[in-house]
Image (cartoon, coloured by chain):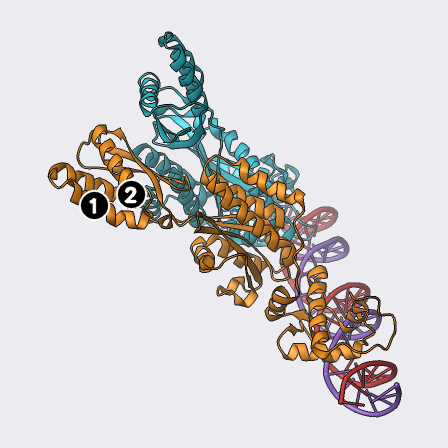
Chain colours: A cyan, B orange, C purple, D red
Amino acid sequence: MTGNNQSLKKPAASLEDRFHKILCVIVQSYIETTEPVGSRSLSKILDLGISPATIRNIMADLTEQGFLEQPHTSAGRVPTYKGYRYFVDICMGQTPLSTEVKRVIEQAVRESSQGLVSLLTSTCQLLAGLTQFTGIVASPRISQTRLRKVEFLKIEERRIYVVLITQSNMVLHKIIEVSETLSQDFLNSVSASLNRQFETEPLDDVREQVLQSLSESHEKYNQLLAQAVRLSRKAFDLTEERQLYVDGQSFIVKEFNDIEKIQRLLETLEEKITLIGLMDNGMDEEGVQVTIGEENPITDLQTCSLITANYSNGGIVLGSIGILGPTRMDYSRVIPIIDYTAKALSEAIANQ
Amino acid sequence: MTGNNQSLKKPAASLEDRFHKILCVIVQSYIETTEPVGSRSLSKILDLGISPATIRNIMADLTEQGFLEQPHTSAGRVPTYKGYRYFVDICMGQTPLSTEVKRVIEQAVRESSQGLVSLLTSTCQLLAGLTQFTGIVASPRISQTRLRKVEFLKIEERRIYVVLITQSNMVLHKIIEVSETLSQDFLNSVSASLNRQFETEPLDDVREQVLQSLSESHEKYNQLLAQAVRLSRKAFDLTEERQLYVDGQSFIVKEFNDIEKIQRLLETLEEKITLIGLMDNGMDEEGVQVTIGEENPITDLQTCSLITANYSNGGIVLGSIGILGPTRMDYSRVIPIIDYTAKALSEAIANQ
DNA sequence: GTTAGCACTCATTTGTCTAGAGTGCTAATA
DNA sequence: TATTAGCACTCTAGACAAATGAGTGCTAAC
């Protein structure tokens, strides 16, 4: 871009520089056209006065180094996952989001005020819609969150409805059965005690500490205490039930034309536990994470790339969102969308 | 089935009887093999000493009457939706469920005690797993249900968490914002008043009547009353947010090999609103409903059949469950599964 | 170091042919 | 009159061959 290079013989750019440029253009071109790119067309695109023959030499080297591969002898070159990785890490710029798209994201996230579940499902739909790939959203790890409030509601003689409200206003609720009849007053006193002391504890600790602390402070009320402990134990014994929301499976069909592969991908997406594990892998990382092709541990996903980002509240990572698309996706377009959506989601949870 | 008909020339069964038999066998055979069935093989299967030529005549008649069609001139016959309809209504027996399968259903439904959402999602997975088709579950129409309890929890100065527990122990909850500061005592008195008077009203009526009744009984406390009315209005203003759970999309790929059709089907499944409408169509009917091919108003589903059944509580239909599969599915196998699962689900909701 | 030229490879497309399954029609049969 | 055998006809699916063309690797010249 430093001017027009019409002269056939100009001082050649440094070797490495040219390798870099050609690799980037190949990846870019392949992402755009989905066609293996050959030396002739590449020479034209580059417009640096390098002949196809020279480019062929360079391409041969790049192939040898594992950045490119050939579907078959007489085809052009296609990036390997290593090629994409180089592109994503080094070549790629991010196309900034239009204010239009930003507005759509903010609005979508803001409008679903009907609780966390609907917030997450609509975020998932949003991702699928904007990227035109399959959207994936993992629900928060509740053990990582802090409690704001615990309440017990007696709904029947021996059934109690437990509401746990976290600092991020996530509401967990369940109905527990108790063997003894407990008065609403008693329930209130237990919840008051819990709320007072442990509002800011992460749920995991509460499970242990609450019970411990209860027994210390009320040692004399043995009978009631036993009941309170039993109650609390049941209340906090939440099977950590993570959810995975998936939307836009139909986009998979568009991207792959091998019917077997499509089926395997859909099956993998139905196997939610596997995916949740995968999403959780990146919980410690910041920003957008890109997992390309063979970098992915799940065999059936190795023709795909997974773009994810975490959402959090008060500095604590809750879960992650992302999309699954073909390795040859337009990373520069997708990454900013995931990034912005994750941030918008975090904000929405904080302000909920 | 009235004995073995070895003799080549036996008194022919009545014409209509033979039409009936042949149509049934064609449908059955096609369901089993997925191959268009021709006159020769049909003659063998039937084993009634009827020659292929005769069968050809009958098949021609059946084709003319719209029960069968030919993919092309030199292919065998394939049932039309009218053919399947005849088969389902008249020919088909139901293969009774094995106690094995019954146990699986009961167990699956019983085990998910973690609230309605998880009950419905696991029912959906169950349907997909058992039938090997795509499972569909529509969540209850909440306006049709009756309330058991209403509670208000003050979680912040101006934010109130509302819990609505229905007679079927479905828990609806939301956070509402109020403009004035309300004490927990006041909230308790409002909920007590609501609970006392309207526990058994369907939610739709509550919306109107509660407000009405409140204003009659407490006319003097004008200030508080206004607040109570505002509060209640917000609490009951639940956008009727139906959910649709879908699982086992991958089975669609197995059944159809036209990649375009697969994509259109997946897209339709993602368009949940359309499907909910479709499921609600059968809300008034009892038992299992079968919608075959072109009977379905949605064009993209006209190569599929939809088998649904309602689930209910206390005689009130809440929602419906079902599966989507190819028209050539084994109806006699699938229908009992849907039937039994719907009943098990209804029971699980009642006992929840 | 770069390039032109050329022989070579290989997937894809197109056309042709054949085998096979199944039909519809007609004339013979019981 | 209903049934059947026989036959010509239709159409698909699969196999095969030839043509096409994009792209490569190598070599020799610049």
Which residue occupies the foreground of this view, B312 or A284?
Answer: B312
Viewer-closest of B88 and B60: B88
Could you confirm whether marks 1 and 2 are on the same chain? yes
The location of residue A165, given as percent across then percent down, is 35, 29
* For residue B158, side relative to residue A70 (left or right): left
SS category of the residue bearing label 1: helix
Q: Is residue A138 above or below residue A198?
A: below
> Left or right of A232: which side holds B225?
left
Q: Are marks 1 and 2 in contact (CB under 8 Å)?
A: yes
Q: Name the image quarter holding the C terminus of chain A.
A: top left
Q: Chain of mark 1?
A: B
Please give the residue where the numbered disc 2 appears in the rendered image.
B198
Separation of disc 1 and disc 2 at Cα? 10 Å
Residue at mark 1: B213
Mark yes or no: residue A325 visible. no
Figure quadrant of residue B162: top left
Compared to A271, does B256 lie above or below?
below
Q: Earlier in the sequence, mark 1 or mark 2?
A: 2
Q: Which amino acid, mark 1?
A: Ser
* Of residues B174 and A185, the one drawn nearer to the viewer in this rendering: A185
User: For the residue marked with disc 2, what is the amino acid?
Assistant: Phe
Estimate how packed mark 2 is, as few (under 14), some (14 to 19) or many (20 or more) residues with alpha carbons within 10 Å: many
Left-right relation of B331 to A171: right
Q: Position of residue B65 (x, y in %)?
A: 63, 78
